Amino acid sequence: MTRNYLASDQSLAVDIEAHAVDAMVELCTRSGRLETGGVLIGRYSRFGDRVVVTKVTGPPRDSRHFPFSFIRGIAGLTRRLRREWVEGAYYVGEWHFHPFAAPTPSSLDIEQIMVFAADADLRCPCPVLLVFGGDPRDAWSLSVAVVMETGSMVFLAGRT
């Protein structure tokens, strides 16, 4: 089932397709007690008020995993994103795992997504920051935020 997240003023939504969630659960389960992550791939609605996450990547091979941090590498990522672009899917943000902890973004997480938002080469001025937290085999949750073009960050709540 697609997971839906909505800004409190209902001006913005993020939908995460079920197979993307399943992929994160699998990647986080394999990662154990080390953080992991990757990029979000998807598309925007015609009016730019909805992001649909259709795929997540795993960590590029040059990524670094630690119990309390994750440094996403870049090996092979440009080629992957170009291939997705040709197929009509785009880089829409970042995701990572806080093992057995709350999915609350750290100040470093927020700082990094702001840097990505300002990077014209990424062509994504409003990236999604998704943090997966908890136990991927049992009780887990997601935090979803979007950097707006104004430079502010909006946190979205899950809808049922």
Image (tube, grey):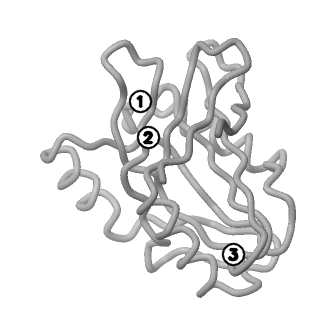
Horizontal side of 143 relative to 42 (left or right) equals right
Circle 1 SS class: helix
Please state which of the two labelled residues, at mark 1 or mark 3, is closer to the viewer. 3
User: Which of the marked residues, 1 or 3, is nearer the chain's N terminus?
Assistant: 1
- The residue singled out by tag 3 in the image is 136
Give the amino acid type for the residue marked by disc 2 in the picture. Val
Residue 41: x %, y % from top left: 38, 49
Q: In the displayed structure, does residue 126 sit left or right of residue 82? A: right
Q: In which quadrant of the rendered view does residue 8 lie?
A: top right
Residue drawn at x 73%, y 41% as measured from the top left = 111
In the displayed structure, 8 sits above or below 145; it is above
Find out whether the residues at labels 1 and 3 contact each other: C-beta distance under 8 Å: no
Q: With 127 as the anchor, is 53 left or right in this view?
A: left
Secondary-structure class at tag 2: strand
Q: Position of residue 113 (x, y in %)?
A: 63, 41
Q: Is residue 150 above or below residue 78?
A: above
Earlier along the polypeptide chain: callout 1 or callout 2? Answer: 2
160 left or right of 54?
A: right
The residue carrying pointer 3 sits among few (fewer than 14), some (14 to 19) or many (20 or more) residues within 10 Å by Cα, namely many
Residue 28 picture location, percent across and down = 62, 76
Q: Residue at x 58, y 72 (%)?
A: 25
Binning the other alpha carbons within 10 Å of mark 2 as few (below 14), some (14 to 19) or many (20 upward) gives many
Query: How far separated are the C-alphas under marks 1 and 2?
Result: 13 Å
Percent coordinates x, y for residue 74 in the rendering: 43, 64
Q: Which residue is mark 1?
A: 120
Residue type pointed to by label 1: Ala
Which residue, given by chain and number where applicable, does mark 2 sit on?
A: 92
Q: Residues within 10 Å of mark 1 (few under 14, many from 20)?
A: few
Quadrant for the C terminus, please.
top right
Q: Earlier in the sequence, mark 2 or mark 3?
A: 2
- Real-space CA distance between mark 1 and mark 3, rounded to the nearest whole angstrom: 34 Å
Going by the numbered disc 3, the residue's amino acid type is: Pro
